[in-house]
Image (cartoon, rainbow, N blue to C red):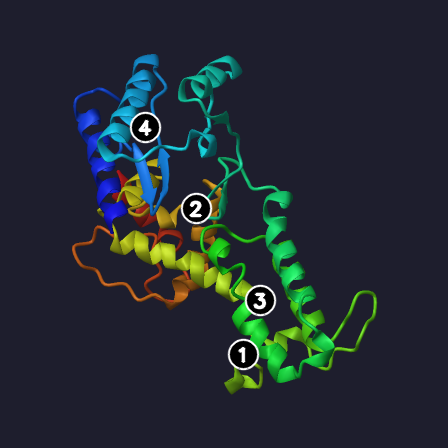
Amino acid sequence: MLFNLVADVFSRMLAKAVNSNIISGIVPHIIPQGLICLQYADDTILFLNPKPEYVKNLKWLLACFENLSGLKINYDKCEVVPINMNEDDAKLLSQIFCCKLGDFPLKYLGVPLHYLKLRREDIQYIIDKIIKRICGWKGRLLSYEAKLVLLKACIASVPMYLMSVIKFPKWAIKAITSQMAHFFWGNLGDEHKYHLASWGLISQKKDFGGLGVPNLREFKMALLASWAKRYFMDSDKNWVRLVGHKYRTDKPNVLWAKQGVGSPFWRGVTWAFEGIRPFYKWKLGNGDKISFWNDVWVGDSSLKPQFWDVYEICQQ
């Protein structure tokens, strides 16, 4: 609690500095005063316009915070991660802050971050973690009931956090599912045992004849689709403003934008939204979140392709 109070003071110091034009964050044209800081517990990310005066002022602010709070910033654990900067300027920044120069992908709260698509090796650690955990269990000494509990509680939960923010690739889901099946049926190393039922059946709900092991693909869709719900519910949040500005189209909502456009995160959200869209029921409200021409009102097609001539007349 005490640490949270001090962290809040630091956040207010930064906000005051931005208002006084001592430092400047990023995207001030989208978010009022710009994005300058993200905090979670003792993890902090600072976003800074890298003008020399802003850099020096931030260094001074950090020194003031140390003196006022009695806390000391461990610069050995800090990184400067430049975006679209030349190498000499990036090295100068790291020297000013006396910390190492980082690069993408970087991890924040356990999630690998990259402004490009994550590589295979950036996700491989999840599969390695599952394999290491399974290897520590004596599969031959466990009953099927015990294995089922371990699969549900300890294995299926490992990738869930990462799956909630990226569209987990098919190869990774296949690899994890394979490890789960091998463990459940008793495969050890190169030894192969016959699987008495398909994994598709095993991952069905018990009401439908399965064993209730989570279906990772369905979980991936559900977790990413939750961001679509948040987009509608949290219209005043900064991340909604960022997404709305970056992917704005002629449609009333960016979730109707063409799939495959945008960051890996947003492509995952739009993919999941298309999967659950047939099960949504829209309330008209004041009309700012519905599209008369692009939404499906009757049948399985929107009005736009069915009444193209009328649509063109309406656009004039």
Q: Of marks 3 and 4, which one's residue comes earlier in the chain?
A: 4
The answer to whether residue 40 is above or below residue 278 is above
Amino acid type at mark 1:
Gly
| Mark pair 2, 4: CA separation | 20 Å
Marks 3, 1: nearer the viewer: 3
- The x, y position of residue 300, in whole percent, is 42, 64
In the image, taking residue 193 as reference, residue 263 lies left or right, namely left
Residue hosting label 1: 212
Q: Residue at x 57, y 86 (%)?
A: 209
Residue, x 26% and y 41% (percent of image)?
7
Q: Would residue 191 be visible to someone looking at this image? A: yes
Q: Looking at the image, is 207 positioned above or below residue 138?
A: below
Q: Are marks 1 and 2 in contact (CB under 8 Å)?
A: no
Which residue has dot 3 on it? Answer: 155
Instruction: Pinpoint residue 188: horizontal percent, then vertical percent.
Output: 78, 69
User: CA separation, marks 3 and 1?
Assistant: 13 Å
Question: Is disc 3 placed on a helix, strand or loop?
Answer: helix
Tell me the distance, in whole angstroms, between the alpha carbons under discs 2 and 3: 26 Å
Residue under numbered circle 2: 266
Distance between the Cα atoms at labels 3 and 4?
A: 39 Å
Cβ atoms under marks 2 and 4 closer than 8 Å: no
Of the residues tagged 2 and 3, which is closer to the observer?
A: 3
**Residue type highlighted by circle 4:** Ile
